[in-house]
Image (tube, rainbow, N blue to C red):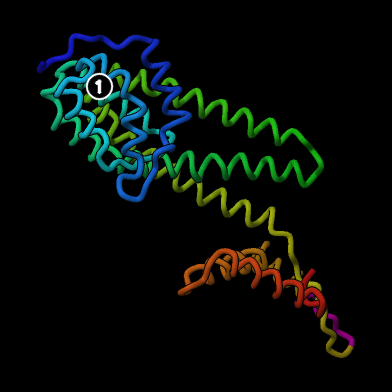
Amino acid sequence: MTKSNYKLTKKDFNQINRRSLFGFQSGWNYERMQGSGYLYTILPQLRKMYGDNTDELKDMMKTHAQFFNTSNFLNTIVTGIDLAVEEEEGYAAKETVAGLKAGLMGPFAAIGDSIFGALLPTIFGAIAANMASQGNPTGLFIWIVANIFVMFFRWKSIDVAYREGSAFVTTMSDKLTALTDAATLMGVFMVGALCATMVRVQFAITPHFGDVTVDVQNIADQIMPGLLPAAIVGGVYWLLGRKRMTSTKAIFIVLVVCVALSALGVIQ
C-alpha cells in the first residue's frame, strides 16, 4: 500500500480531539516526551488509513512514536497538517511527515507558550486576582470563559490545519512570527502592569532633620510611581538568576526581608 484510500470524517476529528485533550500528555517521558501521546492521538486513524496489522501501519507507528515536543495547545495544528499529507500521499509521505513534525514542533512550541502559557494566564490572572482582592467572585467565571475559548480553539484548529494541509505552513509563517513577537511584547507589558498594581508595598519611614520631616514615599513617587514594587520585582528577578537559587528560596528571602523591614518601620 502506498496511498491511503480512506477519507477522514468529522467523527474521526472528534475522536482525535478527545484523545488529544485527555491523553496527549499521558505517555510523557524524558526520552521521547510527547511521542507516544502523539501516536495515541491518531492511532485509530492510522489503522483506517493503512489497515490493521500491516507492515505500513507498524512502520508509521514507529515513525510517530519518535521524539516530539510542542505546545499542548497547538499540537492539533501539527496533527491536522500531518493527517492531510498522509491522507493524500499515504505511506509514501513517511519522510515528509517526519520532517514536518520535526520542523513545526519548535515554532509552535514557542507560539503556544507565549500566547497560551504566558499571555492569556497573565491577562486573565491579573483581572481575576484584582477582582478577588476586592471580594468580587466574577474573576472565577472569567477563568472559566477563557478556558472554554482555549478548548474551542484547540477543537477547531485541527479542522483548519487539515483543510489547508502543508500550505498552512507557508501561508502563515510570516503571520505566526509577528504573532509570537506581539504576544511576547504583550506578556511583558502585562507583567509590568501586574507589578505596579498587585505588589502593594511602600515606604513607611519618615526621617526628621531638625524641623524638617522627609516623606520618603513622596520622593520615591516623584522619581517614579511604583518605584519600590519595581525594585522588589527586579531584586527577585536578579535572585532567580543566581546559581543554585530556586523560586522557593527566593520567596522565603523576600518574606524574611519584608517582615524585617516592616517590623523596623521602613516599609508597610
Q: Is residue 180 visible?
A: no
> What secondary structure characterizes most of the magenta part?
loop
Residue span colored magenta: 211-215
Q: Is residue 20 visible?
A: yes
Q: Residue at x 31, y 38 (%)?
A: 35
Q: Which residue is mark 1?
A: 165
Residue 50 in percent (x, y) is at 19, 17
From the viewer's perspective, is 110 left or right of 193? left
Residue that sits furthest to the right in the current view: 211
Residue 233 in percent (x, y) is at 60, 64
Q: Label 1: how many residues lie within 10 Å, few (<14), some (14-19) or many (20+)?
A: many
Please, what secondary structure does the residue beneath circle 1 have?
loop
Figure check: 215 above or below 201? below
Type of amino acid under label 1:
Gly
Q: Quadrant of residue 76?
A: top left
* Quadrant placement of the N terminus: top left
